[in-house]
């Protein structure tokens, strides 16, 4: 027995139903505000990551052309959300061609357009200069990124 005369076992321990419902309601409100922002943020980062990958691969093709002294071709296929660097082998499987599928993980993006002087193919010569300048537009969710290839510098 305690000093007030009550039994310790009779003291109430736990939460009331009202307290539990209030906490669940607050969690629901915070979640409802956070989920759209999170989803939008994920789309932004996917579009950014996709554009960085395309830029890196164009630079890879340009450098490879300069190192080997032979033309290097990059072909974009917007219908299948893929592009290929002809003549290079896959970094994962040396027996496969270098093909990047942007529709799969981790990109989950699409190629909206790719245009280099009227077609979706750019050829870097032995000096790293492209046959035509152009642009590639990629999209993830509501976010689009445009990659511009300069015809003079190849960058």
Image (cartoon, helix red, strand yellow):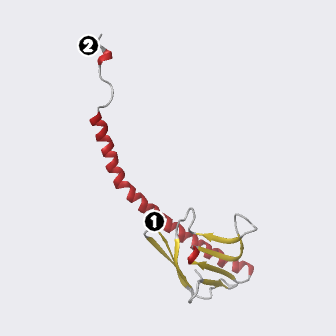
Nearest to the eye among marks 1 and 2: give it. Answer: 2
Q: Nearer the viewer, residue 127 or 73?
A: 73
Q: Nearer the viewer, residue 40 or 20?
A: 20
Q: Nearer the viewer, residue 112 or 155?
A: 112
Image disc number at residue 44: 1
Is residue 149 in view?
no
Write down the residue under mark 2.
6
Tell me if residue 84 comes above or below residue 34 in the rendering.
below
Tell me if residue 83 comes above or below residue 12 in the rendering.
below
Q: Position of 11 compared to 81: left or right? A: left
Q: Give coordinates of residue 41: x percent, y percent.
A: 43, 61
Q: Quadrant of the C terminus?
A: bottom right
Q: Give coordinates of residue 137: x percent, y percent.
A: 50, 77
Is residue 115 in view?
yes
State the residue lying farthest toward the right: 95
Tell me if residue 84 comes above or below residue 115 in the rendering.
above
Question: Callout 1 environment at 10 Å: few (<14), some (14 to 19), or many (20+)?
Answer: some
Question: Callout 2 environment at 10 Å: few (<14), some (14 to 19), or many (20+)?
Answer: few
Identify which residue is drawn at 62% across, 84% down.
122
Alpha carbon separation for disc pair 1 and 2: 61 Å
**What secondary structure is marked by label 2?**
loop
Q: Position of 32 compared to 131: left or right? A: left
Identify which residue is drawn at 58% across, 74% down.
80
Q: Nearer the viewer, residue 55 or 28?
A: 28
Residue 33: quarter of image: bottom left
């Amino acid at each position: 027995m305690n000093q007030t005369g009550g039994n310790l076992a009779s003291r109430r321990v736990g939460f009331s139903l009202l307290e539990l419902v209030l906490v669940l309601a607050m969690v629901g409100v915070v979640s409802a505000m956070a989920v759209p922002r999170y989803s939008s943020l994920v789309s932004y980062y996917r579009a950014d990551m996709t554009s960085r990958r395309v830029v890196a691969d164009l630079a890879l093709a340009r450098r490879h052309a300069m190192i080997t002294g032979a033309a290097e071709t990059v072909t974009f296929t917007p219908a299948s959300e893929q592009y290929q660097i002809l003549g290079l082998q896959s970094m994962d499987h040396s027996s496969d061609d270098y093909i990047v599928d942007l529709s799969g993980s981790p990109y989950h993006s699409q190629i909206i357009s790719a245009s280099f002087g009227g077609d979706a193919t750019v050829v870097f010569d032995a000096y790293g200069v492209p046959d035509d300048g152009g642009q590639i537009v990629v999209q993830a969710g509501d976010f689009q990124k445009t990659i511009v290839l300069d015809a003079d510098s190849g960058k």
